[in-house]
Amino acid sequence: MSQFQIGIDVSEHQDGLSLVQAAAEGIEYVIIRTTDGTYQDRTFSSHFEDAQRAGLPVEAYHYLRNPSEGTTIAEQVAAACAVMGDNIVPMWLDCETPAGLRLEHVREARDLFYAAGIPVAGIYTYPRYWRWRMLGAATAEFGAVWAADYGADRAGPPRELLDGRQWPGEIGKQAPVMWQYGSRGLVAGYEIDVNVRRLIST
């Protein structure tokens, strides 16, 4: 039987959002940005501490930049590790830069995070991005897939926004385990990215 968990992802753009309040409203996990390229998110630690107070499971994400944008993959991973510090949680590689990425960039980031002791959960991407930029390459080598597919992107309570929606199709020959289905979920007084994670119980 399939089960679902509703979560949000946050960055400094949601500075001040109470994850304690989010949990009280039914949010079940949070994914926190560490970095965009080498830019270090100034609220990772405060969001992480708030998530702990709220009792929410935490993962992280890094917006992966093409080295042509000015920073090497190694510099980006080092910046993300510095932000994370001792708060080691699974890392998602956000693959959506308009500059485009190559598989070798994603592989290098994955390998460097693992070498630093940080597990890589998988990749975040849009179906169209992966199909056009990566030519639909298999994604299994990077772990799981977190798909972004907003549809009409209406505003409203997170669970209501799922009504009538269909789970996204495969990306790189595997079905997503998590789906970012909107950017206007109403949570703790903010409009925010909302996600649903599919859990399979036996």
Image (cartoon, rainbow, N blue to C red):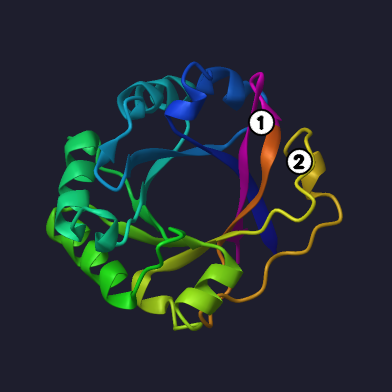
User: Do the residues under discs 2 and 1 have CB atoms within 8 angstroms?
Assistant: yes
Q: Mark 2: which secondary structure?
A: loop
State which region is magenta. 186-202
Question: Residue 64's x, y, as percent?
Answer: 34, 56
Judged left or right of residue 185, residue 131 is: left
Say which of 73 and 143 sits in front: 73
Residue 10 lies, in percent from the top left, at 48, 34
Label 1: element kind: loop
149 in relation to 6, above or below: below
Task: Report the residue marked by disc 2.
Answer: 159
The majority secondary structure of the magenta stretch comes to: strand
As shown in the figure, which amino acid type bears the numbered disc 1? Gly
Task: State yes or no: residue 86 in magenta.
Answer: no
Front label number (2 vs 1): 2
**Mark 2 or mark 1, which has the lower sequence index?**
1
Is residue 86 in view?
Answer: no
